Amino acid sequence: MQSNEKRAAYQSFIETVRAVLEDEKHPVTKMATIACLGKQHLPTYFWVGFYCMVEGELVVGPYQGSLGCLRIALGRGVCGASAAQRKTLVVEDVHAFADHIACDAASNSEIVVPILNKQGELLGVFDVDSTEFGSFDAIDQEFLEALMNEHFSDCDRLM
Ligand code: SME
């Protein structure tokens, strides 16, 4: 996907989410809507969804795609590493990532964005997988960090 096409797809995704979620406060409803609209707007999204911090571990939340792992310990896999480091991880080849958890062998690249609230508490992570290598870059990071901040910075918890 070319950069200009990707930016246009993200603009449309983000504006649609904003319009649909106007006045919506429940985090589960927001997560389900974002996963659905992400899958519809970005053709590279093979698996898209949320892992939520529940009692010290990441528990799968709303998602679109094939069966995801149910629970991920902090520090494990790309999701656990992003949560532990509280930073976005862009992985061009998941098979080269030492501790990658393969929920579906079809995934080849991935981006994971941590979700923090205004108090700086870690609420969970947003995870997107692609069947192609090197699908994600600084454009995905920029839009997805802004999207998570816009919709979850006022939340106490995701689930
Ligand atoms: N690949 C992830 C696990 C979650 S799934 O891909 C849905 C990881 O290593 O964190």
Image (tube, rainbow, N blue to C red):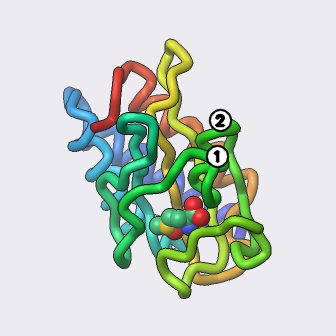
User: Residue 133's spot in the image, x, y percent?
Assistant: 71, 79
Residue position marked by numbered label 1 in the rendering: 82
Residue 143 appears anywhere in the view: no
Do callouts 1 and 2 mark residues in contact (Cβ within 8 Å)? yes
| Depth check, front residue: 19 or 123 | 123
Residue at 51 percent of width and 56 percent of height: 127
| Image quarter (top left, top right, bottom left or bottom right) of the N terminus | bottom right
Q: Residues within 10 Å of mark 1 (few under 14, many from 20)?
A: many
Amino acid type at image mark 1: Ser
**Picture layout, residue 55 above or below residue 95:** above
Residue 68, image x, y percentages: 39, 69
Q: What's the residue at 32%, 52% (across, down)?
A: 61
Specify whether tag 1 is near ligand 1 (CB below 8 Å).
yes
- Percent x, y for residue 47? 45, 70
Q: Within 10 Å of the Cα at label 2, are there few (<14), some (14-19), or many (20+) other Cα atoms?
A: some
Residue at mark 2:
86
Which residue of the protein is positioned furthest toward the top in this rendering?
A: 119
Left or right: residue 53 versus residue 44 is left
In the picture, the quarter occupied by the C terminus is top left
Spot occupied by residue 98 in the image (x, y as percentages of width and height): 76, 68
> Label 2's element?
loop
**Which amino acid does the dot numbered 2 rest on?**
Arg
Q: Is residue 139 visible?
A: yes
